[in-house]
Image (tube, helix red, strand yellow):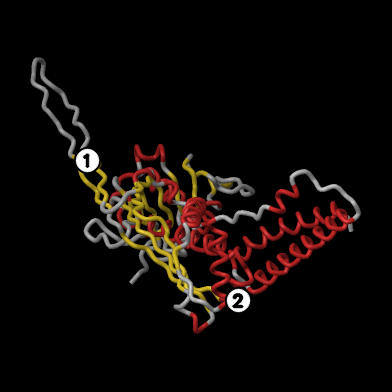
Amino acid sequence: MDKKTLMAMLAKVKAKIKEKFEAMLESSKDEDIKAYENLLKQAKDLEEQIALVEKEELDEGGTIPEGLEKEDKKPKELSEREKFGQKIVEAVSKGTSFTGLLPRECTRNIQMKKEQIARVRGLCTVHPASGEYTIWVEGDDVVVDYINENGAFGETTPSINGVGLAALKLGALTKISEEYIADLGVDVMGYIEEKFAKAFAKKEDKEIIFGSGTSSSKTKLRGVAVNAAAANIVTAASETTVTWVEVKQTIQRLKAYRGNATIVCSQEFLDIVHEFKDGNTYMFPQANEIKQIMGIPVVVSGEFPTLGSEAVAMVVGDFSYYHICDRQSVEVKLLPELYAANGQVGVRGQERIDGDLTVKEAFAVLKMKEAAA
């Protein structure tokens, strides 16, 4: 087989490797892992065949492509991430103890991927900071009133309120089999980055909406659903479904804050909205995905509960008024000795973060009816 054909086959296999790697990260099923391993072997075999063809061409008096000889003599410089991955694989294969924090390059990758995966965090205002952080928010508005001719102006000073953001810790501890690390090779770093980026992105999105912390109890993030203004909470007449009137009422509670608002909800909620009719006509095209409701963009989140008694169906608001304090980005550490007896490597991740909504009136919540006693 000629070199051109082999190169084309290798390119296709590498494309499949990328696709299968993403699928493997999503499911971690045995069949996906085996398929990924088989593709790696195919790529390696093709690379060896290409190397043989190139050697045969040289033996037959072929010319060395310009610059190839220099590149062959110069060893490839491994990235910080690849070097660390090799250390893990070597430690596992030799049975030696190795522990350490992932290099900065990996931390940056996790942070970047976390931003890409998160659906709600990107709507919020984020402050990189250290320690306690206070946001000063204007309270009462300037008062405008009638003044008598030649009368004195009454001075009004808006109150300034401080919203404090702490440095709460979110953490996770998981384990990876030594065999899996050995099979993945340096790609173990990609696996760790993807898994932790996804886990922390999902947790942050959930806490921004449902965090149970309150202004008096700041041990957790203050979620929108728990802390929105009481006047902006609409309760559906049913435990299992909502009406167009209820959806509209919830959005209208925002008043002036509707201009920059976003709706965050579940797919189950959107499926109900898709069935709304005005007379005999569907309000939303049945063949199209709902991307806006009353002109407000819709973001679907998998963190919402199944619709039922008192469940939150929809949150709408201007999330620029939700402030996040990033005190420390996700830090991941390898702990090989923790599960060594089980042939596994421990992986621990943590970050320091806090979040709060600074203007409660900028958010509205639609929740289901409470179950009858």
The answer to which of marks 1 and 2 sits earlier in the sequence is: 1
Quick one: which residue is furthest to the top in this view?
A: 150
What amino acid is labelled 2 in the image?
Glu
Residue at image point 30% right, 45% down: 361
Residue at image point 22% right, 46% down: 162
Q: Residues within 10 Å of mark 2 (few under 14, many from 20)?
A: some
What amino acid is labelled 1 in the image?
Gly
Q: Position of residue 368 (x, y in %)?
A: 40, 60
Quick one: which residue is furthest to the bottom in this view?
A: 341
Q: Residues within 10 Å of mark 1 (few under 14, many from 20)?
A: some
For the residue pair 47 and 177, the one nearer the viewer reads as: 47
Quick one: which residue is furthest to the left in this view?
A: 151
Point out the image quarter for the C terminus: bottom left
Which structural element holds mark 1?
Answer: loop
Q: Which residue is mark 1?
A: 139
What number is the disc on residue 179? 2
* 332 vs 94: above or below: above
Which structural element holds mark 2?
Answer: helix
Q: How many marks?
A: 2
Q: Position of residue 134 (x, y in %)?
A: 25, 47
* 279 vs 215: above or below: above
